[in-house]
Image: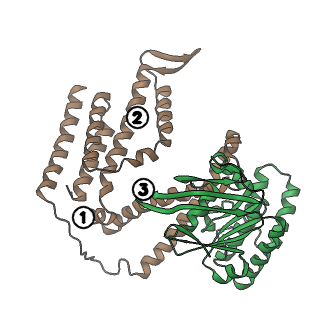
Amino acid sequence: MKLDPRTKLVMVFSLSTLAVFVVDTLLLSIVLIISIIVSNFFKEDWGFLNRARKFILLLVGIAFLQSIFSPSGEILFGIKDFTLLTTGGLAKGIRVILRMLVIIISATIMKGSSPREIIQGLIQWKVPYEIAFMVSLAIRFIPILGQEAKDAFTAIQLRGIEIDKLSLTKRFKVYSYMFMPVLSGVIHRAKELSTSLEARAFRAYPERTSYIKLELSKNDLLIMSASIVFTITMLVIYILLR
Amino acid sequence: MKEVCSSNTFIEVNNVTFSYKKSEIILKNITTSFDKGEFAALIGPNGSGKTTFGKLMTGILSANEGSVFVEGKNIEEISLGNIGKKIGYLFQQPARQLFNPTVKEEIGFAHSFMGKSKEIVEQKVNKIIEEFSLQGLEDASPYRISRGERQRVALASIFINEPSFLILDEPTTGLDIVRKEQLSQLLKSLQPQGIGIIVISHDKDFINKNADRVIELYGGEQHEA
């Protein structure tokens, strides 16, 4: 089913709002299942999860830190007087993972829409063109930045630096070197882009016309309304349960 | 799996197939080898897989099928750091391989990082700076110099490691005729030392003048020219 990007934005916003506000493991799990079902409905490519597997450790690490620094309930694991894991801390850690997964998976709903369609959707929502354009640039540049960071890391290693054999301090030093080419690339690209925009008369006229015009179908309106009603209902249930 | 190669072979490529997406095969069953002291050129139209091939031979990318051997050892078993000690790789966009605040630090990076004495690093850096005509740029930022100068800094920072083999992706981009000639002479002087070179380029004059062997990639297949 081809949906308007605005409908998808409402769905993403609804699911992310729930992920941020709900602090109940069961409700968060339900939101996660719904996010997976919706994302699957749009037949999104799940290959990104495979690529993101490196971040699983980071996710687990954050959850673990969360559980250490906000202990509550019974002690599950500790070293002498220092408590490492508690039942309450573990529950909080799990909730952090669930929340992040909901945000990541719900964002994949947008993958099927082109940046141009997203800009048009935002403009028709009366978002200023400059802001909408900046959003689309950010979306377009994220993978490029990732590639540049990866290239810099590869280049450092190809100078004969064996990362695995380095001490932790030296390893951090290597990572710090990655910022220079990425930052320089960003500044350079921003300068070139601004010159190119000026040269092509960006904002020469106060009004912009567009050959694309998005129209909301009945399905769009139905799904948008359902998303909003669902979000409000879930939030009400959550508040009542508390 | 074959692990032995002739004593003069440095890189051996066995039936390598590679694709970024399953539907689009970039390289199909490529089998070739590159010897020590050889000057080979990889040519082909845009998108024919030249850079991809270079990255496969440096271990930056892994083949979907087939294997690459460096000095008889499967590249999958060698860390990038170790490959970097043997093979010098010049990126198509040299700015991506520069990460130090000054040209001098950039060239001496590998040695300083590995803890070599200041005097030795200084001596080597000065020699390389002279060889690559980078005098006067020692304290300049590698990001605030011309493209041609940046290309030379990237090349210089590879050469300081004294690699046994070089894979240079578009090394003549941004170089003027004089610098191109200097590069040509420098590369030619490395061959008698047994250093092998693969140049990925569109620069026909440079290739015709220097390469002993030309491999053309077209439609994912290799054609020895």
Q: Residues within 10 Å of mark 2 (few under 14, many from 20)?
A: many
Residue type highlighted by circle 2:
Val
In the rendered image, what is the letter of the chain coloured green? B
Residue A126 marker? 1
Report the front residue among A239 and A195: A195
Residue beneath disc 2 = A96
Q: Chain of mark 1?
A: A
Report the front residue among A4 and B204: B204
Q: Is residue B134 left or right of residue A210?
A: right
Report the front residue among B39 and A147: B39
Residue A106 marker? none
Q: Chain of mark 3?
A: B
The residues tagged by marks 3 and 1 sit, at their Cα atoms, a distance apart of: 41 Å
Mark 2 or mark 1: which is in front? 2
**Secondary structure category for the residue under label 1:** loop
Q: Is residue A103 visible?
A: yes
Display colour scheme? by chain
Q: Residues within 10 Å of mark 1 (few under 14, many from 20)?
A: few
The C terminus of chain B - image quarter: bottom right
**Secondary structure category for the residue under label 3:** loop
Circles 2 and 1 on the same chain:
yes
Residue beneath disc 3 = B22
**Secondary structure category for the residue under label 2:** helix
Circles 3 and 1 on the same chain:
no
| Residue contact at pointers 2 and 1, CB within 8 angstroms | no
The residues tagged by marks 3 and 2 sit, at their Cα atoms, a distance apart of: 35 Å
N-terminal label among 2 and 1: 2
Above-or-below relation of A92 to B39: above
Residue type highlighted by circle 1:
Lys
Identify the residue at the far left of this view.
A218
In the rendered image, what is the letter of the chain coloured brown? A
